[in-house]
Image (cartoon, rainbow, N blue to C red):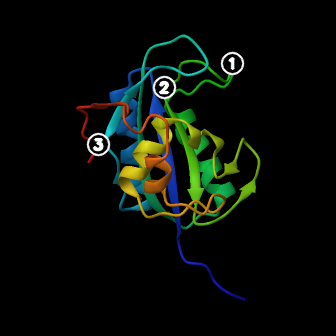
Amino acid sequence: MAVRGPGLALLSLGSNEQPERYLRAAVDELRARFGAVVVSPVYRTPAVGFEGPDFLNCAAAIRSDLEPQALNDWLHALEDRHGRRRDVPRFSSRTLDVDIVYFDDRVMRGEGNLQLPRPELKHAFVLKPLADIAPEFVDPVQGRSLAALWAAHPECTTPPAVEALDLG
């Protein structure tokens, strides 16, 4: 029986309610639980799918000892600890949204909207931060690096605006 080491999880983080506060808190908790965290620049983008304040979005790379479903559950608990409401429409303002976009080269579905890779990768606010921190990572479905996917993205020439927020 092969024993897996920690998996590479690439995460998408977003917030449009006190976003500086909640993104910092999320990165701090990721570091406390998983150790080293690589964080992308932060981008400001309009809300997608509803009218609301702009979002601040970034990506993070962690090494997780948890399997994807357990990590997804841990991330949902993180969101809940920081005021994420689940009694409102799915597309609405939120304090914190943290999704696993990739976990190694896994392609799967699970509970709690777990889908690897995440379909939101089509949005510049998800793809650009990921390409910033893991340009050579190869999408297991498309067989192309994140840098190549970003270069082919329609918004590549007009990327989201970088926000002056250092999450370290």
92 sits to left or right of 44? right
* Outermost residue to the top: 51
Asked if marks 1 and 2 touch (Cβ < 8 Å), the reply is no
| Residue in view at x 49 percent, y 41 percent | 153
Q: Which x, y percent locates residue 80? A: 57, 34
Label 3 Cα crowd, 10 Å radius (few <14 / some 14-19 / many 20+): some
Question: To which residue does mark 1 refer?
Answer: 89
Q: Are marks 2 and 3 in contact (CB under 8 Å)?
A: no
Observer-nearest residue: 116 or 82?
116
> Nearest the camera: 33 or 116?
116
In the image, residue 115 sits, relative to residue 96, either above or below, namely below
Q: Residues within 10 Å of mark 2 (few under 14, many from 20)?
A: many
Residue 102 in the image, given as x and y percentages of width and height: 58, 56
Q: Say which residue appears at 35% left-offset and 50% top-offset.
A: 39
The picture quadrant where one finds residue 5 is: bottom right
Disc nearest the viewer among 1 and 2: 1
Numbered tag placed on residue 95 in the rendering: 2
Labels 1 and 2: the sequence-earlier one:
1
Q: How many marks?
A: 3
Disc 2/disc 3 C-alpha distance (Å):
16 Å
Q: Position of residue 58 (x, y in %)?
A: 40, 40
Residue at left 24%, top 40%? 166
Q: Which residue is mark 3?
A: 167
